Amino acid sequence: MRKMDPAKAEAYFKYRTTMIVIYLTIGFFASYLVVFFAKGLSSITVMGIPFHYYMGAQGAVVIFIILLFVNAVISDKIDKKFGFDPKFVDSTNQTVD
């Protein structure tokens, strides 16, 4: 397996870390901040249900599932940008009998 250029590896790590921080921030907003502002958000309704109740019952889970899919798509794009091609990895990990 070939080694990666340290500058390129640092950029890759920084980009991935930034994306993780963004996902965690969105998760924090979806789960905790809605609870903190529940009284003010009770006037907003989603499908006839108060917003704070909807987020506690279903909305946060839906947001986390969406974040999983978004993470998978963005991770693939980041990997391709930095030269991590799954086809290359699969072809180099073949065992010789």
Image (tube, rainbow, N blue to C red):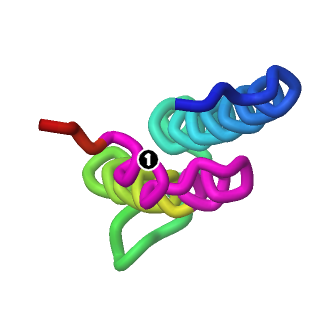
Vertical order, 40 against 35 (above or below):
below
Vertical order, 24 against 54 (above or below):
above
Q: Amino acid at mark 1?
A: Val
Q: Where does the magenta region start and end?
A: 74-93
Q: Looking at the image, which residue sits at the far bottom?
A: 47
In the picture, which quadrant includes the C terminus?
Answer: top left
The rendered magenta stretch, by its main secondary structure, is classed as: helix
Q: Looking at the image, which residue sits at the far right?
A: 7
Q: Looking at the image, which residue sits at the far front?
A: 97
**Number of dots carrying numbers:** 1
Residue 2 visible within the image: yes
Q: Label 1's element? A: helix
Whether residue 83 sits left or right of residue 8 in the image: it is left
Residue 1 picture location, percent across and down: 52, 30
Nearer to us in this view, 96 or 49:
96
Query: Looking at the image, which residue is at 35% across and 51% down?
Result: 90
Q: Write down the residue under mark 1.
A: 89
* Residue 85 included in the magenta stretch of the image: yes
Residue 89 picture location, percent across and down: 43, 47
Give the image quarter of residue 21. Answer: top right
Query: Looking at the image, which residue is at 82% across and 33% down?
Result: 8
Nearer to us in this view, 56 or 73:
73
Q: Looking at the image, which residue sits at the far left?
A: 97
Residues packed near mark 1 inside 10 Å, few (<14), some (14 to 19) or many (20 plus): few
Whether residue 6 sits left or right of residue 37 in the image: it is right
Residue 51 visible within the image: no
Query: Looking at the image, which residue is at 27% across and 44% down?
Result: 94
Residue 81 picture location, percent across and down: 73, 56
